[in-house]
Image (cartoon, rainbow, N blue to C red):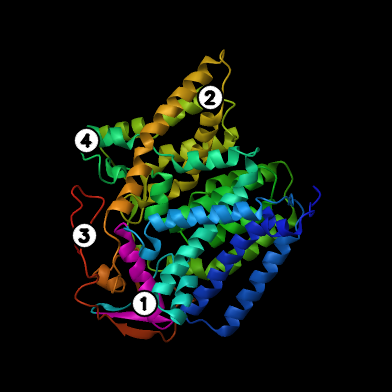
């Protein structure tokens, strides 16, 4: 085991081990808070909290941690400030414009703050329950119950910024050098595809949300942070843990223990890392490096996450699922602009990737097959499950952009030129998303709960009370009548995804 360097005591809090277990501890806290939201017994909550603490302590004591400091405290503070700015520009805290997805998100947070735990909505079809990935909301909702709805929104902002900071700090040691981690981070933030060209071919406006030019979508890094931070964080957390294990900086049991706990934040974002984790586990199994802790500790994590898995599985019969079918022309154009350029760069630049072949191979296969699946609304499956794979491709592209191939390496030179062109064209997406955040009106306060913003509800967020799985179904929830104000927000809310930015209209 590598020695643990503790020359500077203030660095101990920023070790990779501390960052990783801080993230896992937060995710396990969400599992405990879900029990409170569902009104399960204090004994169950106490047992879950005790077992969570024991699991974290056991993971801390495992052999295989490098013990090195991920970043210095000053750097950690700078990363946190940058993460705050990123999520503020995405609409968190309502300091600037927020995309219309935040209408639903703030409504869900309102219900978690304002309604007693547990509760069921009273509808004409019978009582229903909120059944969605609530992991991102539970801690802010507790803050809101004490200090009000806007305090909950600010707590959500701080929480998300802290999680992203921990993820970036955890990944920072994977890229050697002083300047390289910062350069890699900036290049990854600018990562996108050739959406602008696709939009122009389809005759759309270059001023709107560019990523919807096709029937399919692989989403840029900044767009993910602005539109769906819960899915983005789940996918990025999984990617950071996988890369840390791959680099030999954390034990296998830690990565395996993370996966079940991710589902409550985003089942689809967490699902995206599963193929990589399976490949890692099989590789260790065939190499006969599996230890008892690699089986026992993840099993404890599964047990702790079981209530959240049952919660998310309740009423799934009403959630759309199956296979997707698109016109041939749509497939061809989509892959031409969203996948093929990266395949060309990766093929030509072998040796400048920053990543291993297995990780990139799985990523490419995922990007090729995901459009065929469907779970949830429209193309959510491919957009969210692809997040870890896209993160790996972005890191590989950043490695190519940073490299300086030998003048005799014609393939490397060609790869870098293609990567630069793709990167510069793709920059239009994060620049456009950020410009709209600054130029469009500030997001108004959302007065409604979920049913006010989504009359009738969607099966992806709501399940009938009698279809909740019995083990986690509240015995006596408070029945809350749906009494929403006539207007959910007081001023027009422009829709950045439509030409001319018309007011968003509730449907």
Give the mark nearest the N terminus, 1 or 2: 2
Nearer to us in this view, 8 or 213: 8
C-alpha distance separating marks 1 and 2: 54 Å
**Residue ID for mark 4:** 202
Mark 2 = which residue? Answer: 349
Instruction: Check disc 1 and report its element: helix, strand or loop.
Output: helix
Left or right of residue 438: residue 154: right
Q: Residue 106's x, y, as percent?
A: 35, 68
Whole-angstrom CA distance, mark 1 to mark 4, is 44 Å
- Mark 2 and mark 4 lie on one chain; the one further toward the N terminus is 4
Q: Nearer the viewer, mark 1 or mark 2?
A: 2
Q: CA distance from mark 3 to mark 2?
A: 45 Å
Question: What crowding class fits label 3: few (fewer than 14 Cα within 10 Å), some (14-19), or many (20 or more)?
Answer: some
The quadrant in which residue 360 appears is: top right
Q: Which portion, as a residue range, is magenta?
A: 99-123
The residue wearing badge 3 is 504
**Secondary structure beneath label 3:** loop
Closer to viewer: mark 3 or mark 1: 3
């Amino acid at each position: 085991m590598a020695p643990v360097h503790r020359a500077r005591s203030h660095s101990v809090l920023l070790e990779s081990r501390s960052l990783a277990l801080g993230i896992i501890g937060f995710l396990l806290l969400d599992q405990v808070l879900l029990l409170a939201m569902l009104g399960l017994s204090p004994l169950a909550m106490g047992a879950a909290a005790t077992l969570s603490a024991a699991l974290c302590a056991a993971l801390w004591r495992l052999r295989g941690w490098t013990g090195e400091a991920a970043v210095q405290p000053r750097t950690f503070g700078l990363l946190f400030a940058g993460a705050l700015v990123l999520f503020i520009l995405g609409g968190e805290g309502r300091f600037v414009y927020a995309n219309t997805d935040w209408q639903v998100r703030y409504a869900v947070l309102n219900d978690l703050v304002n309604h007693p735990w547990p509760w069921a909505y009273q509808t004409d079809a019978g009582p229903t329950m909120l059944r969605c990935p609530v992991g991102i909301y539970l801690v802010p909702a507790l803050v809101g119950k004490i200090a009000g709805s806007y305090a909950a929104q600010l707590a959500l902002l701080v929480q998300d910024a802290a999680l992203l900071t921990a993820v970036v700090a955890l990944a920072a040691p994977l890229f050697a050098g002083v300047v390289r981690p910062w350069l890699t981070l900036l290049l990854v933030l600018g990562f996108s595809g050739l959406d602008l060209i696709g939009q122009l071919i389809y005759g759309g406006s270059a001023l709107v949300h560019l990523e919807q030019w096709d029937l399919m979508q692989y989403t840029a890094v900044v767009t993910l942070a602005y539109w769906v931070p819960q899915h983005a964080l789940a996918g990025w957390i999984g990617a950071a843990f996988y890369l840390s294990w791959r680099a030999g900086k954390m034990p296998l049991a830690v990565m395996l223990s993370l996966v079940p706990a991710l589902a409550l934040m985003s089942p689809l974002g967490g699902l995206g890392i599963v193929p990589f984790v399976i490949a890692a586990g099989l590789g260790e199994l065939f190499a006969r490096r599996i230890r008892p802790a690699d089986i026992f500790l993840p099993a404890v994590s599964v047990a702790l996450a079981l209530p959240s898995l049952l919660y998310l599985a309740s009423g799934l019969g009403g959630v759309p699922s199956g296979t997707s079918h698109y016109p041939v022309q749509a497939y061809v154009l989509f892959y031409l602009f969203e996948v093929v350029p990266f395949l060309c760069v990766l093929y030509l630049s072998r040796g400048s990737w920053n990543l291993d072949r297995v990780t990139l191979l799985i990523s490419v296969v995922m990007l090729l097959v995901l459009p065929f699946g469907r779970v949830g609304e429209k193309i959510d499956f491919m957009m969210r499950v692809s997040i870890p794979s896209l993160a790996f491709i972005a890191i590989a592209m950043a490695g190519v952009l940073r490299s300086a191939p030998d003048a005799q390496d014609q393939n490397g030179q060609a790869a870098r030129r293609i990567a630069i062109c793709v990167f510069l064209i793709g920059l239009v997406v994060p620049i456009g998303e950020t410009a709209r955040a600054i130029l469009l009106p500030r997001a108004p306060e959302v007065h409604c709960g979920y049913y006010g913003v989504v009359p009738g509800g969607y099966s992806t967020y709501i399940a009938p009370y009698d279809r909740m799985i019995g083990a986690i179904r509240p015995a006596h929830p408070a029945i809350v009548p749906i009494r929403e104000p006539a207007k959910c927000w007081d001023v027009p809310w422009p829709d950045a995804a439509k030409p001319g930015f018309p007011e968003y209209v509730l449907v």
